[in-house]
């Protein structure tokens, strides 16, 4: 295998199928006296202090995609915890061609809606991801063309870089005309609405195998206490950020599925001279970790001495439908405010925050960013793109020395955005509910969960 080609590894679900075949052969080779089995099915429910009215895998700031995107969507390629790349919706790894590389799709793949996956869907998904902020990340892919045979001809020439760019959750494949309010993908679950809840049921067309669960019900929590109350009472199966509201649920144990993204502080044009690269990160680094501990934020390093906000009194914009971010904004505002230089929290609609972010007509804002992948480069490109998509695309091609190699907080010192806190999937669970890690080693593979109450011996 050439040095520029990524290693070919079986996917998690392919490995499970292979293991099942080996076990079956072993059982057939000897008398069967007794064996245990695990019945598939069951239902899990949880409440989350994040919006779930829509889920868009291509948005850098989509919280629902951050936590649950892998439930619904696949990319052309997948990356495991060791960094190895394997085909997912693609038939094989990219093949060199005279004009770049070519990618053949797996035959017979359907979206949860039943629509067949075509090269046009892939081309449209790549274009959509580029328009949503992945332009810099997708630079190695080059121009995309659908051939007469239904394959994809890509202008990129570095096979390993093309495969890695197309393995990101932010380059997931969706059908043409995709609507985030009605998400449709090839993942283990199919989505539907039930009131204000996002209900995920088993996808019979799942490209890499359907979910083991029958259903995963995700409701938006009005505040941080709603999930803990429901978990403590036994109504929910997972508790967000704790083991209970008033007291721990009996037998519950904590879980932490790892870092998924970051909450970032932005400075805008109304910040005046405080709208300079590195200011947001300096402000974030000056916040005492104890002020954020109730939000599940880890203290990676001690706070750096800082005088807080020194600009004119200003509002700190934050999405009103994200209770976790709103609570974080309140803690940040208190930590940064000084007499005559007060910071006040201003929860706004998502569209209003997006408009302010585009025009830069604000003083401070709190936001969410997803990494393109779990490498330092994936974090770097996401952060620079979140500050300025055009600049992000330019810097992604030539990362400055120490930028892509540094931590997200180091990168923040170069930008007008600063990392305030890690965003993690963590809380409480019952001890017999195992949460398998996601394919890349972080998050939860909800499609591989087996409900403990359905174990049959």
Image (tube, rainbow, N blue to C red):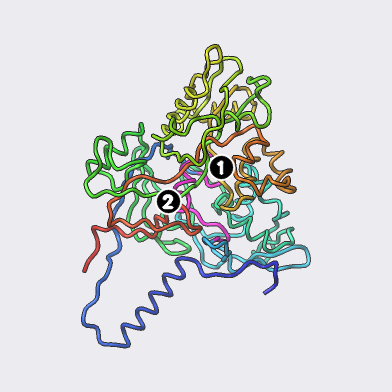
What residue span does the magenta drawing correspond to? 56-79
Badge 1 vs badge 2, beta-carbon distance below 8 Å: no
At a point 78% along the width and 63% down the height, the residue shown is: 99
Name the residue rendered at 29%, 57% in the picture: 451
State the quadrant of the C terminus: bottom left
Q: Earlier in the sequence, mark 1 or mark 2?
A: 1
310 or 103, nearer to the observer? 310
Q: Is residue 372 magenta?
A: no
Pointer 2 residue: 257
Asked if the stretch drawn in magenta spans residue 77, the answer is yes
Residue under circle 1? 59
Q: Position of residue 415 (x, y in %)?
A: 66, 35
**Residue 292, horizontal then vertical, whole percent:** 44, 33
Nearer the observer, 199 or 328: 328
Quadrant in which residue 85 is drawn: bottom right
Q: Quadrant of the N terminus?
A: bottom right
Residue 303 at x, y percent in the picture: 53, 33
Q: Nearer the viewer, mark 1 or mark 2?
A: 2
**Distance between the alpha carbons at the discs numbered 1 and 2:** 22 Å
Question: Image check: 106 left or right of 183?
Answer: right
């Amino acid at each position: 295998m050439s040095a520029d080609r990524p290693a070919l590894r079986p996917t998690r679900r392919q490995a499970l199928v292979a293991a099942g075949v080996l076990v079956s052969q072993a059982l057939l080779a000897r008398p069967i006296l007794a064996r245990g089995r695990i019945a598939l099915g069951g239902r899990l429910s949880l409440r989350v202090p994040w919006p779930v009215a829509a889920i868009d895998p291509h948005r850098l700031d989509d919280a629902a995609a951050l936590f649950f995107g892998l439930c619904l969507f696949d990319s052309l390629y997948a990356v495991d915890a060791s960094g190895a790349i394997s085909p997912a919706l693609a038939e094989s790894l990219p093949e060199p061609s005279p004009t770049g590389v070519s990618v053949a799709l797996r035959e017979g793949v359907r979206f949860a809606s039943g629509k067949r996956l075509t090269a046009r869907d892939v081309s449209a998904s790549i274009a959509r991801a580029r328009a949503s902020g992945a332009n810099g990340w997708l630079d190695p892919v080059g121009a995309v063309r659908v051939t007469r045979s239904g394959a994809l001809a890509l202008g990129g020439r570095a096979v390993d870089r093309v495969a890695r760019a197309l393995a990101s959750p932010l380059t997931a494949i969706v059908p043409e005309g995709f609507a985030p309010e009605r998400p449709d993908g090839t993942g283990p679950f199919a989505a539907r609405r039930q009131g204000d809840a996002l209900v995920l049921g088993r996808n019979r067309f799942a490209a890499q195998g359907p979910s083991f669960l029958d259903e995963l019900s995700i409701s938006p929590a009005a505040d941080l206490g709603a999930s803990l109350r429901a978990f403590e009472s036994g109504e929910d199966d997972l508790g967000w950020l704790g083991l209970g509201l008033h007291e721990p649920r009996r037998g519950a144990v904590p879980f932490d599925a790892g870092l998924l993204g970051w909450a970032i502080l932005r400075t805008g044009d109304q910040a005046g001279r405080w709208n300079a690269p590195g200011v947001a990160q300096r402000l974030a680094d000056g916040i005492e970790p104890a002020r954020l501990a109730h939000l599940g934020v880890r203290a990676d390093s001690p706070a750096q001495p800082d005088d807080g906000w020194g600009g004119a009194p200003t509002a700190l914009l934050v999405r009103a439908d994200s209770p976790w971010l709103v609570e974080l904004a309140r803690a940040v505002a208190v930590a940064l405010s000084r007499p005559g230089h007060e910071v006040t929290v201003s929860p706004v609609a998502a569209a209003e925050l997006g408009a302010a972010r585009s025009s830069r007509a604000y003083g401070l804002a709190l936001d969410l960013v997803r990494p393109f992948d779990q490498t330092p480069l994936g974090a770097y490109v996401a952060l620079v793109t979140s500050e300025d998509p055009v600049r992000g695309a330019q810097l992604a091609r030539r990362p400055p020395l120490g930028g892509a190699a540094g931590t997200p907080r180091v990168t923040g010192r170069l930008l007008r955005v600063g990392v305030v806190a890690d965003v993690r999937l963590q809380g409480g669970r019952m001890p017999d509910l195992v949460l398998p890690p996601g394919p890349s080693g972080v998050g939860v593979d909800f499609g591989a969960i087996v409900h403990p109450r359905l174990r049959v011996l």
